[in-house]
Image (cartoon, rainbow, N blue to C red):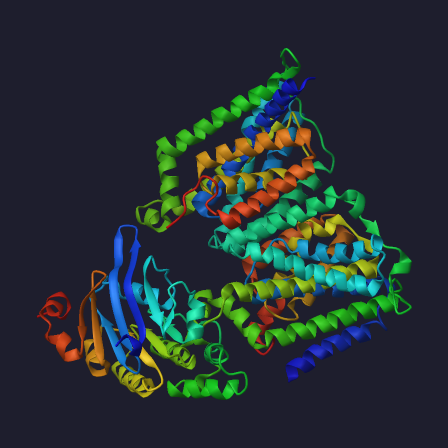
Amino acid sequence: MRVWGFHLAVVALLFGLQFVLPPYHFTNFARIMVLAVFAMGYNIAFGVTGLLSLGHALLLAAGMYGTGLAISVLGWAALPALLAGLAAGGVMALAAGVLALRTAGVAFMIVTLMFAQAGYLTILYFGPVTGGDEGLVLAQGARVIGGVDLAADTPRYLVALALFAFALLANLALVRSRLGRVMVAMRENEERSRMLGYNPFAVKLAALVISGLYAGAAGAAYAVLFGYVGASFAGIQYSILPLLWVLLGGAGVVLGPLVGVLVMFYLIDLASGYTTAHLLVVGLALLVLVLFAPKGILGSLRERAWPWLP
Amino acid sequence: MDFGPFLLLAVMEGLVAAAVLALTAVGLSLVFGVMRVVNVAHGEFFMLGAVSAWFVTHWLPGPPAFGFALALILSPLLVALVAAAADVLVLKRLNYQPQATIVATIGLLYILQQAALSLYGPEARPVAAPFTLAIQFPWFGYSGYKLAVVAAAAVILTGVWLVMTRSRVGLVMRATQIDRDTAQAFGINVDRVYAGVFAFGAALAAVAAVLIVPIRQAHYLMGGDPLLLSFIVVIIGGLGRLRGTVVAALLIGLSDGVVSMFFSPTLAKILATLLVALVLVFRPQGLFGQRAG
Amino acid sequence: MAAMSLLSARGLIRHFGGLRAVDGVDFDLAAGQIHALIGPNGAGKTTFVGLLSGRIPVQSGTIWFNGQDITRLPAHRRVALGLAYTFQITSIFAALSIYDNVALAVQRLHRRDLRAHSMAHLARVGLKGRADQVAGTLAYGHQRLLEIAMGLALEPRLLILDEPTQGLANAEIDGFKALVQGVVGQTTVLLIEHNMEVVMDLADRITVLDGGRVLAEGAPAEVRANRAVQAAYLGG
């Protein structure tokens, strides 16, 4: 039970931060929380189930464009558009997963990479509708739920927090459930899992679809909360970043993604004060992690001091 | 221009693209074939080749042919050194474990890109071709240099093939590819072979870039397309198979050139990308490989 | 006779390139028995049970389990029907706790009382006190016991044990024998074994494989007396 208490405390802490954070960081944290939801989705696929996808940008973009196009082209209100984005993420994950899961290991990485690349190019190809590289700015009037303007700082922060809290607690419940245990088993020893009666394809597909729902939710929220939809979110960078965030924070640890996004965000922020070499920071971070700290921050902590951390 | 000559022009452009692509892809294929490593930074080795060629020709006074010839030797050498260092310092430490190596090569990609951005800058800069010779066809004039590129690529690829199949070095590489542990038991220094292969694969990409840089320009982001296309070629041709890679490069290069001339290049890329994914899903041995086991 | 067979195979064939691992095997297994499968190394025993469990696809022949044709059924579906297999080379979840290992098997059948059932199965093999220990840190003999516990926790109709006593000390082997004799009421056991003492003590029927074919089949005494079996395997 103290596990639930711990995670609720984290949520409470984030809630309390809104009263103390200066405006610059206030917006940052809203962004961090939304991206942390995306990263948690990736963690479910990669950290928990062992599926190293290099194409998760496809799922983020599905959510983002699902919502963005619903608003700008179909004229939907924010709430149904958000749901559309969520569904788009899940459906895209299902479609890609059914094909990609016929492969494994390196081939799986490449197939997911290719699917994401195709998605990115398709967004560019339909530029007139999607806004191509420049993207779409969503009308302020559309970013309203129940009369509350989501472009304003505080509502935006609270919506981001609500989404994050829900995603976090759902993630925790999943990891401690029977399905969660099976996902871990698939990662640890697929053949043994199969011989215990579990269908590897079905379990992995479930992991991907859940991951897609998370990514879709994050993309949808990003679109509505920050009012911008762009092809860059479908690019390879946003397939690499969740991998980096999860590795940094601790793969397979529920709070890992949040830590990863937070640390990376401020690492680059700090580095920007000294140099414009952002790519270098990302590249070095990846190398250092994979060579010396493959378990990441919370992963190492869990190993050494907090074995109860889920 | 009528359709016929237009098509011929498209085919010739496609050949040039295929030639460069074949060299790059063979480099990637060798690395995967022998080391089972998917090098996501391969495109950056290509880019480094082009950028270092610019530096060499920029600093060397004299006729462009001289600077270019020197670049053709120095750039691949430099890139090979960088690659060997990356292998020894990073990949070897990870024991070439698949997931870890991919993450490491991604890190390498970012570092190399940043290095180019910082040292070379964000602009695209041209490099002078070693010679300008216009070959006059009945319907259009064509750059003699481009034809020379195709010829050079063919010569180099033949050389690679000869080395792989006829020389002792090639034998050692193939032995290590087939069974690493047995090769080691036979006294082959597998670590050195791996470093050598990784360096050689990078050098091939660099050579391809030096050849193409007078036609295109050197830019710090130019590695992305060659990476994607090389992946496509290697997967369709069957990972680790030389002949399949060359044939696939011809196919992809020609069709990319032709399709891009008649349709949107973006659409061509979308189709190529999906084709790769579907080949991997439904026919993982590629179009030319044999199913294992 | 066929109606009483829990599992029967007809004309099973499985080649690997030029190697005829299983070369036309007919097999019947009656319910409620302990049936041993013996034979020299390379006789095809593990391949044969691989075909039965679904780990290896059949090239030719049919397999019937509990009146159902399972020849084309994937492995995980066969487990759901009640056919469990424990690995020749111990294959547990080394990074997970002992409890999690067993729970993965138990949770297929029991939603509630997961903890109670898992602990009970662990107690059966004497591992209850170590429930939170990481499975990979167990001694080899205990890992084997965990494997068996996982197999039993599936409450299968047929449990296939692939060389279960290999690497076990004598005391552990005695415990194993008692365990198997205890379950045979609910679970039929098919046992691949090289330890002839265990085979003779436990088995109700023995099938001898050699070169991918059935050399002999019958009650232990018959098989022991069989000349061909003696020549091929038992040694005079």
Report x, y in % for residue B219.
69, 35
B5 relative to A86 in the view: left or right: left
Task: Choose between C234 and B144: the one closer to the eye.
Answer: C234
Residues C155 and A177: in front is: C155
- The residue lying toward the viewer, choosing from C101 and B104, is C101
| Image coords of residue C3 (percent x, y) | 30, 77
Is any part of residue A28 visible from this angle? Answer: no
Q: Residue at x 42, y 47 (%)?
A: B191
Residue B81, relative to residue A239: is it above or below? above
Q: Is B116 on the left-hand or right-hand side of C121?
A: right
- Residue C121 picture location, percent across and down: 42, 85
Left or right of B258, for residue A182: left
Q: How many marks?
A: 0
- Indicate the quadrant where residue B19 lies: top right
Using the rendered image of the protein, determine whether residue A19 is visible from the camera's viewpoint. Answer: yes
Quadrant for the N terminus of chain B, please: top right
Percent of width and height locating residue A219:
74, 59
Which residue appears at 54% of the width and 27% of the height? Answer: B73
> Residue at 44% of width from left, 84% of height from top?
C130
Q: Check the image and report above or below for C176 versus A84.
A: below
Q: Quadrant of residue B8?
A: top right
